[in-house]
């Protein structure tokens, strides 16, 4: 099984299924591809039906899209409980994950990760002042506070035990750090900041960062 990812330094989408497969205990290889030059872009189009990464090559098929790969992993590794066991928590974890997958456009666009804005390392930037970004951050903080209050008692993650939702919010934690976002200014009482710290402190995320910063990366 091979997960084809974009540059570890920037590819927030690639990080998500990589974390999920790690938590699943899957035996997989990781191949990092870049898409700067025409030759690299042509190679990506050859590899990818959608023209995007991440991709999972498994059992003779190529799966694409972070959420589809994550759902595949949840079915393939049921013992890893990648979604919460409780049915209500599971439905809400799927809702939060889907909202991240398809929403938070201002956060994504105005606090992007790309050349000059790496997910890893000490580089820091300033978030721009923008009402759409403020709305996204207030929504994020409210969502995190609600889910942590209702389901977080059993552990540091959004639904207590680690779930796919945490994989989807890990790149958001990297954005909060890189853009030095003060969550308290968006309604946080400390719960959101603690959640961000837990996400950034995941050993798997730290391993990803180390690989992203290694001289051989890319
Ligand atoms: N909805 C897709 C988004 C994937 C995506 O945007 N991938 C970016 C890398 S983070 C990409 O492949 N970019 C290639 C390009 O822009 O040429 C998913 O969830 O997998």
Image (cartoon, helix red, strand yellow):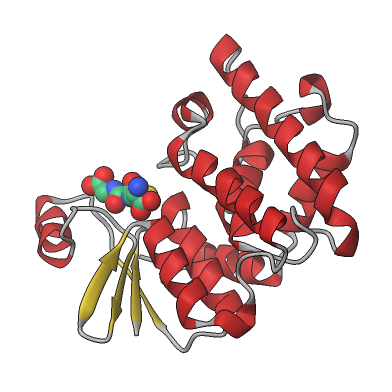
Q: Is residue 177 left or right of residue 133?
A: right
Which residue is at the front of the view, 140 or 76?
Answer: 76
Q: For the point 16% across and 51% down, which residue is it?
A: 37
Q: Is residue 69 left or right of residue 78?
A: left
Q: How many marks?
A: 0
Q: Position of residue 198 (x, y in %)?
A: 78, 56
Which residue is at the front of the view, 16 or 75?
Answer: 75
Q: For the point 52% across and 31% down, which residue is it?
A: 104
Quarter of the figure with residue 141: top right
Identify the residue at the far front of this view: 87
| Quadrant of the rendering where the C terminus is positioned | bottom left
Indicate whether 12 appears above or below 85: above
Q: For the point 67% across and 33% down, which residue is it?
A: 140
Q: For the point 60% across and 70% down, which residue is it?
A: 82
Q: Is residue 118 left or right of residue 54?
A: right
Q: Position of residue 50 (x, y in %)?
A: 19, 53
| Quadrant of the rendering where the N terminus is positioned | bottom left
Q: Position of residue 33 (x, y in %)?
A: 28, 64
Which residue is at the front of the view, 82 or 156?
Answer: 82
Q: Is residue 192 left or right of residue 29?
A: right
Residue 205 seen in the current view: yes
Residue 180 seen in the current view: no
Indicate whether 44 appears above or below 176: below
Q: Position of residue 20 (x, y in %)?
A: 54, 69
Quarter of the figure with residue 31: bottom left
């Amino acid at each position: 099984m091979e997960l084809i990812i974009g540059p570890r330094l920037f590819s927030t989408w690639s990080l998500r299924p990589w974390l999920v497969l790690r938590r699943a205990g899957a035996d997989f290889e990781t191949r990092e591809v870049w898409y700067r030059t025409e030759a690299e872009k042509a190679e990506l189009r050859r590899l990818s039906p959608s023209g995007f990464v991440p991709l999972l090559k498994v059992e003779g098929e190529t799966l694409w899209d972070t959420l589809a790969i994550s759902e595949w992993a949840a079915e393939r590794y049921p013992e890893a409980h990648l979604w919460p066991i409780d049915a209500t928590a599971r439905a809400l974890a799927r809702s939060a994950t889907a909202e991240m997958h398809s929403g938070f456009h201002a956060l994504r666009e105005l606090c992007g990760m790309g050349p000059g804005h790496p997910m890893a390392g000490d580089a820091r930037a300033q978030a721009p002042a923008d009402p759409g970004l403020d709305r996204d951050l207030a929504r994020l903080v409210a969502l995190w506070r609600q889910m942590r209050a209702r389901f977080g008692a059993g552990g540091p993650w959004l639904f207590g035990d680690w779930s796919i939702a945490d994989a989807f919010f890990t790149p958001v934690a990297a954005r909060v750090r890189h853009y030095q976002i003060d969550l308290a200014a968006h309604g946080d009482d400390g719960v959101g900041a603690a959640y961000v710290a837990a996400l950034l402190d995941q050993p798997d995320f730290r391993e990803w960062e180390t690989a992203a910063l290694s001289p051989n990366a890319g």
